[in-house]
Amino acid sequence: MNDRVLFVDDEQKMLDAVARRFEGTFEIHTASSGAMALQMMGHQEPFGVVICDMRMPQMDGLQLIKEARKKFPDSIYMMLTGNQDLTTACNAVNVGQVFRLLHKPCHSSVLHRAIEDGLMQFDLLNGREDLLRRTFGGALTVLTEILELTHPVVFQRSHTVMRFVDELADQLGLGKPWDYRVAASLANIGRVVVGEHDQDRTDTYGVCIDSEAEIAGRLIANIPRLNDVAEIVRRHPNASRIPDHPEQSRETRIEAGALLLRTAIVYEFHLRSGLKPDRALTQLTHAIPGLAKSVLDAAARLDVSEFSAPDDERPDVEIRPYALKEGMILAQNVQTRDGSLLLSKGTRLSQAFIERLQQMAIRDDLRPLFVQAIVETPEASEESKPNAADESQGQSDGDTNADHASADSFSGADEPVAASI
């Protein structure tokens, strides 16, 4: 259960009283202004409940909730007010969409019950959403793995494209939108339908043509909650610009997602073709004329180590099918005994691929397998070791918190927490 509560008020005495009263009951955090609260919300784990005073200088409670809800819609918001007029109540409910409107002075028992109800609501809503996301995500994983197994030449690239889309979106301040990832994994469905699944497209640098994207979009739109994904896939072959504020509306998010998908596909295509990153970036600008500098710069910062590692650092290693592990990269094409191509060089193995290869090996229908050797750098070895300084700091922080709890113990549990404004 998330028991993290953020209390926002410009009166320090009020914040101190709340911290003392609920210490040990909830994980209380306090902020003395709206700006400070937004900063804390942006740099910490999500808060289950956010309670703010209505009247504060610079940014009042209503403005704070409106701004916070844009980036943190899952938190439960409540408001404290000393006003009892109808306008304040209407604005809090209709504009702020608050879960509770509490009046000052607010007795500690009332505030305690409100926080408990808010945290329960947070867990209920987010738990249901998480269950839906995991169930839906699991179904999509099964679908994409089947597509990878039946049409590996086309779909084996989707994992890298998804990662590129994730990193591009994150660098551009869009986070890592789930619908962008799904669009990257399903973008090539149209090619399977029209029968273009046995070869990669070189004329469009791996990107679907309009008719294939249209078919894919139509198929995806039949799945509930994937309308935005369908539109991203439908538009990506011709996407060429990113909006100035891509996070502001559904339309701009779709437009941005389509461009990032096209960018990721084209860049991955050139890297997989053997071009060095700088040359691949040049080809990217030729393929997408007018590509925004912000997107090009973000592409230049992508992790492309799986393409650019020198051969002498990652030699080819023959491996038996039963020793394959998820994440290994094929150093050579995988073929059946009769020479049919199963997987291309550079494919990162998923569990589904491994199981298929192992089944084929049982039937003795597989040529020898070669993967890239895993080279552990000294830096990686050092990073894997526990940091003694961090452990020491953690113990120090624990001691400090214990001292603080002792110093701030509250002796008047039945006193009102909030005073009248």
Image (cartoon, rainbow, N blue to C red):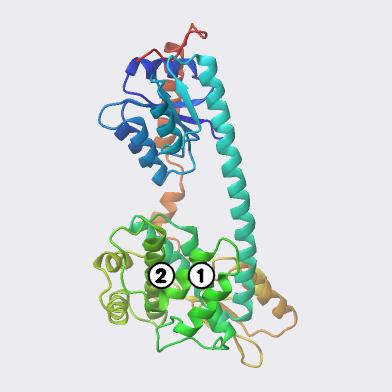
**Towards the viewer: 256 or 185:** 256
Quarter location, residue 224: bottom right
- Can residue 343 be seen? no
Q: Position of residue 166 (x, y in %)?
A: 43, 61
Rendered image: mark on residue 209: none
Q: Quadrant of the C terminus?
A: top left
Relative height, residue 292 to residue 190 (above, below): above
Q: Position of residue 67 (x, y in %)?
A: 35, 41
Along the line of sight, the residue nearer the viewer: 341 or 362: 341
The three-letter code of the residue at mark 2 reads: Ala
**Nearest the eye: 304 or 11:** 11
Under circle 1, the secondary element is helix
Circles 1 and 2: CB atoms closer than 8 Å: no
As shown in the figure, which amino acid type bears the numbered disc 1? Ala
Residue drawn at 38 percent across, 77 percent down: 266
Residue 96 image offset from top left, x and y in percent: 42, 37
Residue positioned most to the bottom: 338
In this figure, which residue is indicated by the disc labeled 1?
A: 230
Question: Vertically, is 402 above or below 1?
Answer: above
